[in-house]
């Protein structure tokens, strides 16, 4: 049995992780961590902080779906203790992930996936494949209105992958210089040179379009998560895989066949 602690266990993603881990036969929840849910009667103990949790309970893996402002502090407690971390919380800079991984005990893995759905991983891989052939590329991401970070972690990773793969030719699409006074941001935020547009609305879980353009043609790659169960096979794959790995790993594709 892989013993799992879930940080953010009362949240939208954390509660879905609790359900998925509970339903799986080879993994078990040993505790949850959530500041406003701690002490509530449950099938497992819930603590207010990761420190309290790991002082009280033996865990092999910490799964973190919390908030951009708190995730680094949670990982800074777990990694030096040798607890492998499976992280879905977005908003962490690559440099911060590298620093946290360097603080880990020997043999410990920090696994971060900006998106745990197979479909989004493929969308990013298709975008990487298309990037060399299209001079223009823009990302539009659509999320529920409770999301705390913009742009999304998936959009940032997509833009990075496009930037790495595209030819050095400069885009001919107009940028900030065309934005009208009072409408700054109309051309999106530039992430590694790729314009990213963030839509927030009731009705969405998570969707993204990557639009490529060249002479007389566009190519649109779109992915939709309609339900948070879409992330759970990827989260379970991460939990089952980190025990065999060490150091920083970014992206679910590392563990996909
Ligand atoms: N990688 C992926 O595939 C996905 C990533 N995400 C990311 O996961 C994160 C969580 O999203 P979501 O579930 O929607 O957010 P929620 O706000 O629904 O859940 C976050 C939970 O974490 C709790 N929390 C706050 N501080 C701490 C702490 N220090 N320790 C433990 N728990 C804490 C919150 O409590 P309280 O509200 O009381 O403060 C809340 O219950 C976001 O960064 C989101 O972008 C989301 C979906 C998929
Ligand atoms: O907050 C969310 O909901 C999601 N966050 C991740 C991100 O920022 O990319 C993954 C997915 O888009 C859902």
Image (tube, helix red, strand yellow):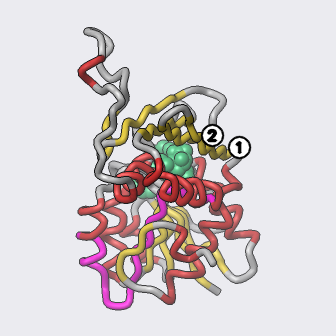
Which part of the image, by quadrant, shows the C terminus? bottom right
- The correct choice, above or below, for 147 with respect to 236 in the image is above
Residue at horizontal 32 percent and vertical 13 percent from the top: 183
Residue at horizontal 40 percent and vertical 48 percent from the top: 159
Q: Tag 2: Cα neighbours inside 10 Å, few (<14), some, or many (≥20)?
A: some
Q: Which residue is mark 1?
A: 226
Cβ of mark 2 under 8 A from ligand 2? yes
Q: Tag 1: Cα neighbours inside 10 Å, few (<14), some, or many (≥20)?
A: few
Q: Looking at the image, which is closer to me, 221 or 73?
A: 221
Q: Which residues are magenta?
A: 99-117
Q: Position of residue 23 (x, y in %)?
A: 76, 69
Q: Which residue is mark 2?
A: 205
Q: Position of residue 37 (x, y in %)?
A: 53, 51
Q: Looking at the image, which is closer to me, 153 or 169?
A: 169
Which part of the image, by quadrant, shows the N terminus? bottom right
Residue at horizontal 48 percent and vertical 38 percent from the top: 214
Mark-to-mark CA distance, 1 and 2? 6 Å
In the displayed orientation, state which residue is furthest to the front: 215
Answer with left or right where residue 177 lies relative to residue 113. Answer: left
Q: Considering the numbered disc 2 on the image, is that residue within a helix, a strand or a loop?
A: loop
């Amino acid at each position: 049995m892989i013993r799992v602690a879930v940080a953010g266990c009362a949240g939208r993603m954390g509660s879905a992780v609790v359900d998925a881990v509970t339903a799986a036969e080879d993994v078990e929840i040993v505790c949850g961590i959530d500041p406003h849910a701690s002490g509530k009667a449950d099938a497992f103990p819930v603590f207010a902080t990761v420190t309290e949790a790991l002082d009280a309970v033996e865990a092999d893996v910490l799964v973190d779906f919390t908030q951009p402002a708190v995730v680094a502090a949670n990982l800074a407690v777990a990694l030096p203790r040798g607890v492998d971390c499976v992280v879905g919380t977005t908003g962490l800079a690559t440099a911060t992930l590298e620093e946290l991984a360097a603080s880990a005990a020997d043999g410990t893995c920090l696994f971060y996936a900006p998106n745990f759905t197979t479909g989004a991983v493929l969308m990013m891989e298709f975008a990487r494949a298309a990037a060399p052939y299209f001079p223009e590329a823009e990302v539009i991401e659509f999320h529920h209105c409770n999301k705390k970070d913009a742009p999304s972690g998936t959009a940032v990773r997509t833009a990075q992958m496009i930037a790495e793969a595209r030819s050095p030719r400069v885009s001919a699409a107009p940028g900030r210089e065309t934005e009208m006074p009072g409408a700054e941001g109309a051309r999106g935020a530039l992430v590694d040179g790729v314009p990213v547009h963030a839509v927030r609305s009731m009705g969405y879980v998570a969707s993204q379009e990557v639009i490529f353009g060249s002479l007389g043609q566009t190519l649109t790659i779109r992915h939709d998560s309609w339900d948070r169960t879409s992330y759970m096979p990827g989260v379970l794959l991460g939990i089952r895989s980190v025990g065999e790995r060490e150091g920083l790993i970014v992206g679910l594709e590392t563990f996909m066949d």
